[in-house]
Amino acid sequence: MTGLGAVLVLGGSVVVVLQMVFVVFVLLRPRTRQSSSMAWILVILAVPVIGVALYMILGEVRPGSRRKRRHRVIQGTIRTVLKRAWREAAAPSLRPGTSRAVARLAGLVSDTEPRAGNRLTLLARTDDFVDALMADIGRAQRHVHLLSYIYLDDEVGRKLGEALIERAGQGVDCRLLADNVGSADFLKSSLCQEMKRRGVQIVRALPTRIDQIASIRFDMRNHRKIVVVDGLVGYTGSHNVASAAFRPKPKFAPWIDATLRIDGPAVRDLQALFVEDWYLDTGQSLDHLIATGPEQHDDGTVVQVIGSGVNSRNQALVRVIQSAIHTAREELVLTTPYFVPDEGTMAALTTAALRGVSTIVVVPARNDSLLVGLASRSYYQGLLNAGAQVHEFRKGLLHAKTMTVDRDFAMVSTANMDRRSFDINFEITTLVYDSDFASRLRSLQERYLLDCRTVDPAAWSRRHWPSRLAENAGGLLAPLL
């Protein structure tokens, strides 16, 4: 054997050993992570060196030991402040059924209780969202806190930036936390520099250096959207700081979103999550700002805010969603831009349909991610076989993440229906236990349905084999998305 041949044999042996070692690592993962284990084993064996490298970078959810310890301290401090603040608050009365079952589980997995007395405004148009936000910022006297996954230097971003500059000039503390990846262009922009120069405090959320890849998963993102004005009014939902035209991906526009404006006690929980995230990325404590909060309104509704993320409680959201699905008796409507559910959620949806619940899933007809779009369609057949309805929204990219159950319970979230939102990203979800609001959200979902095409089960089952092949191949990678 020549020297070159020996080197090749040795190199091949090393690669095989490396593959086997990493396959063992995958098999030793906790059972809660095994939905993606087969996909990772396939990748490692199919593309040996690249597969191993991808697994080392993306295979495990690593928040970083120092960051995780710091986050636990921060959360412990904030929860102590919250418990003290809520000591006198009476627990709201919830009806038996979906509301009581989901609220109890949500409280156990998130350490956040339902709050009574909240007035809610559902904002479905970007212009309405921006107008309401600008009006509230214009009235700010003490502080404006804004957290956004995406902040664009477009007409909306500039308009909001000018408002924050104006309030900062009046002595209002304006703090903006923008995700390091989602808002990367803005953080390098002249707009960002001008805002900083004129008194707006701007911080990168979850910055990660290339030399931290071994200890921190570099693609963890803060996907939350939160605004809090003076601790009295809050916003959360799917709107980023961007116009509906969404300049980075105009061919998929308009972006269709849904956001809640909250006036009431639940704003304190939004504030607590902002304070937690700000503390994590700056080391600056703002605990004093959550010691007091807005009073409840007699005509308000019951709201529960759930924060989920990789550092803790990252199974909270998926458990709550599955619980809500299981409680459905008549109707379940779900809208999401990225439908790549885990096995438990898919089983809950198909079981609901088989139980006779009218189960409706609404997704975009054209997805801005080709792979996610293929993976999403790989789930259609299972839903259709169980009797669920699948509708594809045709007039833009439906970005709203909503759910209604029996027109009695409602959910508005920043989280998509995928593993990234359930296991990796920092997300925020608002649960509303009120039939009037659930009916309002259901009416919005109905408007979405008017602009959809319904997937016909018979036609879907007859589609050509190349389409099925591409979709099922995408489905194999679904647990990694």
Image (cartoon, helix red, strand yellow):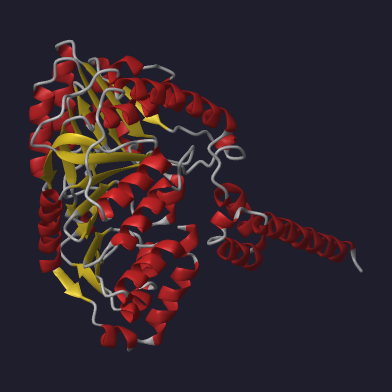
Task: Determine the residue located farthest toward the top in the rendered image.
Answer: 171
Percent x, y of residue 378? 39, 73
Residue 314 in the image: above or below residue 211: below
Percent x, y of residue 375? 40, 67
Question: Which is nearer the eye, 447 or 300?
Answer: 300
Question: Which is nearer the eye, 37 or 250?
Answer: 37
Percent x, y of residue 385? 34, 81
Numbered label tally: 0
Percent x, y of residue 145? 25, 25
The quarter holding residue 43 reads bottom right
Instruction: Tell me: 193 left or right of 264.
Output: right
Question: Which is nearer the eye, 444 or 144?
Answer: 444
Quarter holding the N terminus is bottom right
Quarter holding the C terminus is bottom left
Residue 74 in the image: above or below residue 357: above
Going 27% across and 63% down the picture, which residue do you hit? 328
Residue 247 in the image: above or below residue 190: below
Q: Is residue 153 visible?
A: no
Going 24% across and 54% down the picture, which residue do you hit? 402
Going 54% across and 60% down the picture, which residue do you hit? 36
The quarter holding residue 37 reads bottom right
Q: Is residue 436 visible?
A: yes
Instruction: Tell me: 341 left or right of 114.
Output: right
Instruction: Tell me: 293 left or right of 345.
Output: left
Residue 257 in the image: above or below residue 285: below
Going 44% across and 69% down the picture, which residue do you hit? 474
The quarter holding residue 259 reads top left
